[in-house]
Image (tube, rainbow, N blue to C red):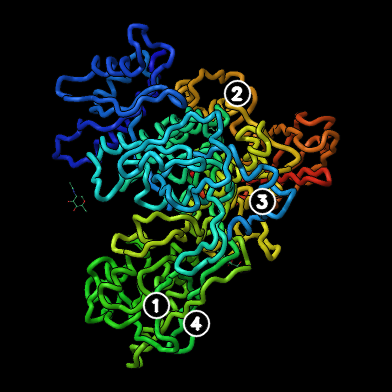
Amino acid sequence: MPPSTTALFLLLLLLSSFLSLSTPSSNNDNNPRTFIVQVQPDSKPSIFPTHKLWYESSLSSITTPTTTTSSILHTYETVFHGFSAKLSPTDAIRLQTLPHVLAVFPDRLRHLHTTRSPQFLGLKTTDSAGLLKESDFGSDLVIGVIDTGIWPERQSFHDRDLAPVPAKWRGACTSSPDFPSGSCNRKLIGARFFCDGYEATNGRMNQTTEFRSPRDSDGHGTHTASIAAGRYVFPASTLGYARGVAAGMAPKARLATYKVCWNAGCYDSDILAAFDAAVSDGVDVISLSVGGVVVPYYLDAIAIGSFGAMERGVFVSASAGNGGPGGLTVTNVAPWVTTVGAGTIDRDFPADVKLGNGKVISGVSVYGGPGLAPGKLYPIVYAGSSEGGGGDGYSSSLCLDGSLDPKLVGGKIVLCDRGINSRAAKGEVVKKAGGVGMILANGVFDGEGLVADCHVLPATAVGAAGGDEIRRYISAEAKAKSLPTATIVFRGTKVDVKPAPVVASFSARGPNPESPEILKPDVIAPGLNILAAWPDKVGPSGIPNDKRRTEFNILSGTSMACPHVSGLAALLKAAHPEWSPAAIRSALMTTAYTVDNRGETMLDESTGNASTVLDFGAGHVHPQKAMDPGLIYDLTAFDYMDFLCNSNYTLNNIRVVSRKTADCSGAKRAGHAGNLNYPSLSAVFQQYGKHKMSTHFIRTVTNVGDPNSVYKVTVKPPGGGIQVTVQPEKLVFRRVGQKLNFLVRVEAMAVKLASGGSSTKSGSIIWSDGKHTVTSPIVVTMQQPI
Ligand SMILES: *[C@@H]1O[C@H](CO)[C@@H](O)[C@H](O)[C@H]1NC(C)=O
Ligand SMILES: *[C@@H]1O[C@H](CO)[C@@H](O)[C@H](O)[C@H]1NC(C)=O
Ligand SMILES: *[C@@H]1O[C@H](CO)[C@@H](O)[C@H](O)[C@H]1NC(C)=O
């Protein structure tokens, strides 16, 4: 099949955008870079004994004499067919013209989306009928974590009382001097690393700063792996905070680590190799707390790798990203991926600022060293003022390295603004300049969301409004020619906090930038101030000079939310081995809740106002209910291909993602992209003039509850005069596994909107048999064309 001209055009477009980025005078335009190449799998001539030899021969047939080496970095054979190689852009275009080459796309750099949570989720070990018991704690299920590697010696990864490694396992434990062969056990059953793509761009890594092995020199991978499947460890805490038992979601599930993220980030060519290996090794779940910009699925290695995984029955959960609270920030949005946003749990680490005028401003911190003298007030200074930084206002307000004048800040508490350098790094800058404490204030974009950090000096974080109040106090005192003072009162760990959960400020939000017909994120899970295992290589603040060492650390991010769902998926799969990845996601979504522990709609941490479906998707996961959802919305690889047809992807684009030839004529008859049998519904109307608009959805539910059951529908309309009707209103099931269809019709009148503006309303469709409640959010978006 000849490469489609649109794909070639897109490639040229992408390349020209690369080229325009480089400096105009340079002749680097044709410098080799990494490309991922998809090849038609069944067309290998028999004279080549292996695919790799065939790929090498294809490469040498097109490379120009000026190209010295075009070495193959990875070959892919399970979730994708092809290879990655370092090539000049002109060679990449030439390669695209070979008849057996389906697609060539550039490598991309991704970044990490940087314990009380099992109890908060209602997972109690004493509950004999609970999900943990039913699933035997996830024993025999394997979770593959694609991340920064692992610190295998942590207690969270011990293998006491675990059965032998599951017979189906085909994985490996890659050893090296810093990851000896005994590093794996019956808990950590696989460990691999992928750095050829990384080194092709960055050169050989510096082995004094990172381990060229599955060992974790960052902490992120150890943390996420132990959230998904850490064993029970008691006592666990970080510097005295969050004391108690630490446990992952699926304490007996097996772990396999696939290290793809290095000091400079994670490359698509390595991520795709990790997907390929994980699926071929036999994992049941893939957990991926990594992301980047949203691109069409046929250019997105995470979307392509996940499709191949889904097809083999592997559940993929991915973090939504930390780009919140703005709209359209959600990433990892492919409909065959479960996209996870972050919420708070009912635990907090209050550390309040007390000003000289008696005002108290609430903050949070997990600073664990010697505190400030009790009852004593210290001089306070704003780093961005002339009394504080001395340097230029901007870099000193942010407490960037070298921006503070020790003569001005010595012996004082310093107020720094968030941004540019890491929160903990600012603490180190203040400490180096002789400050005694630090207050970290959010900017307007951060709003009121607070993240607790293991600072290297007494420090706390306050919201944007609190920061304004402190700055006002400091300048008022200065005007009155008196000395502004303050202290920080560390109040330890507080539990049963209300309200909880609250959608975390940073959690990335919908609408879905690539497929507005699919609501993303799918769900939220705990992602704020999560206690989990931590390596010895790094201090808890993550900054190089932090010499403290802790078995556990407290981190925040959708990176921490994603592995909660990965662990839950393993428990659900253990309890229901026949469930597809879509069935597992459906169970999590239709049983999710949207009210907090006060019984009111979950709040959005960034505003303090009620949150919406664009923030939390179907809601916050509820594991116990997900075990027995009653009905599920199932999906196969062919349904997703129909979705791609209806999203106007070309046959060649669809083939890049699915490795199959789609029949789009059939799919088009079936309707529109929103007709994918997804557990949430999203109608998008373009308003052309003032008139009535309507659309419909067909959904199919499968009975996984009681054989004889009758479900009745309740519609919570989205308001704004939008009508939602469901037919039939009653579904009568006679057996388990039976599928029944229903039709949802949405009718809306155009609303007054500015050019380019949009309005979103949401409601829900609830099926109930008196025992199960199966809830789907329905979102209606009106867009005014420009
Ligand atoms: C590796 O990193 C260390 C520590 O930053 C540095 O001292 C050393 O010079 C680096 N080595 C190379 C080869 O770049
Ligand atoms: C929060 O709610 C208040 C009161 O309804 C409203 O005035 C304000 O605009 C809302 N803030 C945001 C950011 O939506
Ligand atoms: C696909 O193209 C058709 C015809 O141009 C258009 O009506 C439809 O909205 C497009 N669908 C998507 C999802 O872009």
Question: At x 16% / y 25%, what residue is drawn?
Answer: 68
Relative placement, left or right, of 263 versus 338 is left
In the picture of the structure, the residue carrying the numbered disc 4 is 360
Residue 295 location, x and y as percent?
42, 37
Element type where label 2 sits in the image: helix
Q: Residue furthest bottom?
A: 481
Between disc 2 and disc 3, the foreground one is 3
Q: Is residue 104 visible?
A: no
Q: Residues within 10 Å of mark 1 (few under 14, many from 20)?
A: few
Amino acid beneath label 1: Pro
Of the image marks 3 and 1, the number of the one nearer the N terminus? 1
In the picture of the structure, the residue carrying the numbered disc 1 is 370
Relative placement, left or right, of 138 versus 158 is right
Element type where label 1 sits in the image: loop
Amino acid beneath label 3: His
Amino acid beneath label 4: Val
Q: Residues within 10 Å of mark 3 (few under 14, many from 20)?
A: many
Of the image marks 1 and 2, the number of the one nearer the N terminus? 1
Residue 123 location, x and y as percent?
66, 53
In the picture of the structure, the residue carrying the numbered disc 3 is 622
Q: CA–CA distance between discs 4 and 2?
A: 61 Å
Question: At x 17% / y 40%, what residue is drawn?
Answer: 24
In the picture of the structure, the residue carrying the numbered disc 2 is 668
Amino acid beneath label 2: Lys
